[in-house]
Image: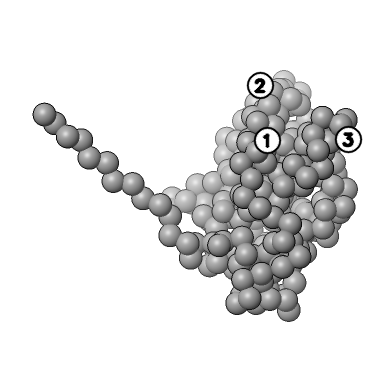
Amino acid sequence: MQAESMFCADTMNRWVENEDARLLDTLLHEASHNLGPSHEYKVKSKTDDQIFGGPLASMLEELKAQTGSLFYGEYLLNKGVLDNALVEQSHLTFTTWAFGHISNGMRDAQGKSKPYSQLAAIQLGYLMKEKAAVWSPEKTAANGKDQGCMTIDTAKFRAAVPKLAQTVVGVKARGDKKLAEQLVKDYVDGKAATDLHKVIAERWLRAPKASFIYSVKVD
């Protein structure tokens, strides 16, 4: 199992395959595209494409939406709409989703940015800065084989989410290209980040991807 190669045992014991959690994350992500500054939003008469450039603007919009998913999950929990177990599973599911995208690399063969991979790297890096996600190189992963693993601290995760949302939405609302580029520099291209990305890729890509062969019978 891919998750047990990355999570420490205490976090792995809390994680389960949960389609409701995955669906919640997807629904809140898509809803968040319609909330806050979007690609039509203008700062000093300029669109986000004009301010950030197309690839960075696209990544920031997806980063806003995925951060919105985390934020509104917590918001709905606090309002009593969602239960604690589902929101926690949604956050853990997000983490494995992030591992998957990070494992695919930050750029394609032509050097073009991969928006989802980069936003996943930024979010994971930010959570690590806030000690919500902690990489312990001395610990053994839940599979009992790999050295080094990640623990997710639920309380710190929940405290970090509104800070992340404020940062991301603020970047778009102000047209703050300097901070946007700094996020990429720190969490996408920084040495500590890229070293961890290599570990994630090596472990996550061990599992073969499913392939499908279709045939058509012609009578």
Q: Nearer the viewer, residue 1 or 208?
A: 1
The reply, left or right, for residue 126 in relation to residue 60 is right
User: What element does badge 3 sit on?
Assistant: helix
For marks 3 and 2, give the one nearer the viewer. Answer: 3
The reply, left or right, for residue 145 in relation to residue 178 is left
Residue at label 1?
A: 24
Q: Amino acid at mark 1?
A: Leu
Badge 2: few (under 14), some or many (20 or more) residues near its Cα, within 10 Å? few
Please provide percent x and percent y for residue 167.
81, 42
Q: Nearer the viewer, residue 140 or 183?
A: 140
Q: Quadrant of the N terminus?
A: bottom right
Q: Quadrant of the C terminus?
A: top left
Residue at label 3?
A: 78
Q: Quadrant of residue 4?
A: bottom right
Alpha-carbon distance for marks 1 and 3?
16 Å
Please provide percent x and percent y for residue 17.
62, 50
Please provide percent x and percent y for residue 74.
82, 38
Residue 40 is labelled as 2
